[in-house]
Image: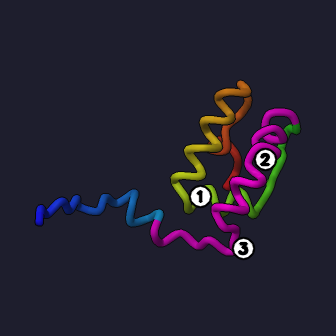
Amino acid sequence: MTDRTTPLTATAAERLLVDTTPYLSCDECFARIDEYVDRLASVPGHRDVLMETHLRGCGVCAEEATALAELVGGTGPESTTL
């Protein structure tokens, strides 16, 4: 068996400790992500606490939201006030 452990970075440790309440699952996030990104691009100051909280704690979903935002040419979730 090969040992493929990678040291835990400070950023990865912080993501593991992020308070993710109120809770939103990845499935629920993916069901809402298109509308969320559309609103970020078209409604100035749009806030969605559930999505913002989930994206702060889930790198996979945050990456998806950022990629969608780039496709629509809008503002990505990383620029919202989290």
Q: Quadrant of the N terminus?
A: bottom left
CA gap between label 1 and label 2 equals 14 Å
CA gap between label 1 and label 3 equals 12 Å
SS for tag 1?
helix
Task: Please determine whether, in this image, residue 50 is positioned above or below residue 33.
Answer: below
Q: Main secondary structure of the magenta part?
A: helix
Residue receiving disc 3: 22
In the rendered structure, which amino acid carries the disc numbered 3? Answer: Pro
x, y percent for residue 52:
69, 57
Circle number at residue 36: 2
Question: Residue at coordinates 69% horizontally, 53% vertically from top-left?
Answer: 30
Identify the mark nearer the N-term, 1 or 3. Answer: 3
Q: Quadrant of the C terminus?
A: bottom right
Circle number at residue 56: 1
x, y percent for residue 8:
29, 62
Q: Read off the magenta span.
A: 16-42
> Furthest-right residue in view?
43
x, y percent for residue 48:
80, 56
* 22 inside magenta stretch: yes
In the rendered structure, which amino acid carries the disc numbered 1? Answer: Arg
